[in-house]
Amino acid sequence: MQYLVPMLALASTAFADASALASCTTYSGSVAIETGLAYDRDQNGHQRVVVQTVRTITGNLSVTGAIDLASLTFSSLQSIGGFELGGLTVLSELSMPQLTQVRELNFTALPAMQMLDFGGTGLTRASSILITNTGLSSLTGINNLEQVDTFNVNNNQALQNISLQVTSITNSLDIEANDGYQSGLVTSFPMLETATNMTFRNCSSVLLPALANVTQDLGFYGNTMEMFAAPNLTTAGGLIFVDNTQLTNISLPKLTSINATYQIANNTMLKQVNGFTNLSIVKGALDFSGNFTEVELPALTQVQGAFNMRTSGDFDCSTFDELESNNVVRGEYTCRGSETTPGSIGTGTSSGSSASGTSSAGQFQANLPAVLGGTSVMAGLLQLIL
């Protein structure tokens, strides 16, 4: 069951049904506010929607394509099943001062939206969050999240900072293309201890001081951070650092095992890789390429996949040659220094001196259920104000 704000003016025959809804606090169903609202406009041609009584919507609240909607207020709303805002080009004010719980939040194409007003502590629980192509400069209102399964924030050009208090992310975290104009995005997850899959792109810093375990991949691509440290990380699925052009230092002192690929590639400022003092086991491939001159892996006892160590720098492979001769490396072994174009596993060889070894070459989207269906009218719930 859903109540739909129609494209046409409300008919008088709907008022009896709407009046019964005006005093309800829990609405069992979905609410859709769609394009073509036939109500008065302010001097700029914009509209406002205010709902004052409803505390709970068990289904979805969906507002899409209402291109003249500038302000949306649900004064008493505390929890929603799913919450979708999309294609609202002039929406600049969102006020839900009591909202704390959302199953799915999906915000797309909201260029005028610069801030969220969820009031109090803001959202504390959500299953999935997608925020893309908005004008938001911060995520105040969701930064006190305690629980989230999927978190995807991308292509928000004004976003300066993301800081969440979550302790676990059970599905995936994706942060990318949030440029913060000139400075880049600062990300901080001070309480996060466990995660399944994490991807960071275009960030100027990433802080994960409590992170202890990542069951799938922890990946950093095209960031501008100068260093990365995870002092409590002990295990990861895959660990990947690619195209982080300002990165000079990586410190993971407690990391003991990587259960998939361990890749460091094309991080042009990274000359020394020496922050993995306790890494013992790599169950996938170890794949390093770049212009580094020093790699220290003193505790390494097993690489179950291929071993690819190729650099344009002056590099001594003798330590790793010894590991290969002692069967520490189970897959194909390559180690070369002074290469013209060092490549990752699967790329061709290039001219340079072979230090030793064999001559081998080495988004998400939170989908809200459809809210189209029977169309009763919720006139009593919606107060449209100039």
Image (tube, grey):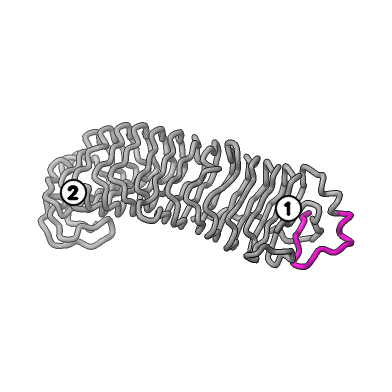
- Name above or below for residue 262 compared with residue 155: above
Q: How crowded is mark 1: few (under 14 residues within 10 Å), some or many (20 or more)?
A: many
Q: Which of marks 2 and 1 is nearer the N terminus?
A: 1
| In the image, residue 3 lies in the stretch drawn in magenta | yes
Quadrant where the C terminus sits is: bottom right
- Residue located at (69% from left, 44% from top): 75
Q: In which quarter of the image is residue 260?
A: top left
**Residue under pointer 1:** 30
The magenta segment = 1-17
Comparing 308 with 138, the one in front is 138
Q: Is mark 2 on a helix, strand or loop?
A: loop
Question: In the image, residue 287 lies at what x, y percent?
Answer: 27, 50
- Under tag 1, what secondary structure? strand
| Residue 351 drawn at (x, y percent) | 13, 62
Q: Quadrant of the N terminus?
A: bottom right
Judge by depth and name the residue closer to the eye, 313 or 368.
368
Name the residue tied to disc 2: 292
Left/right of residue 62 with respect to residue 182 in the rendered view: right
Vertical relation: 346 (above or below) 250: below
Q: In this view, does 299 lie to the left or right of 314?
A: right
Are there few (<14), some (14-19), or many (20+) residues within 10 Å of tag 2?
Answer: many
Residue under the point 25% across and 33% down: 277
Is 167 inside the magenta-drawn segment? no
Q: What residue type is labelled 2?
A: Phe
The CA span between labels 2 and 1 is 56 Å
374 horizontally vs 192: left or right: right
| Residue 156 x %, y % | 47, 56
Residue at the (46%, 50%) spot, across then down: 174
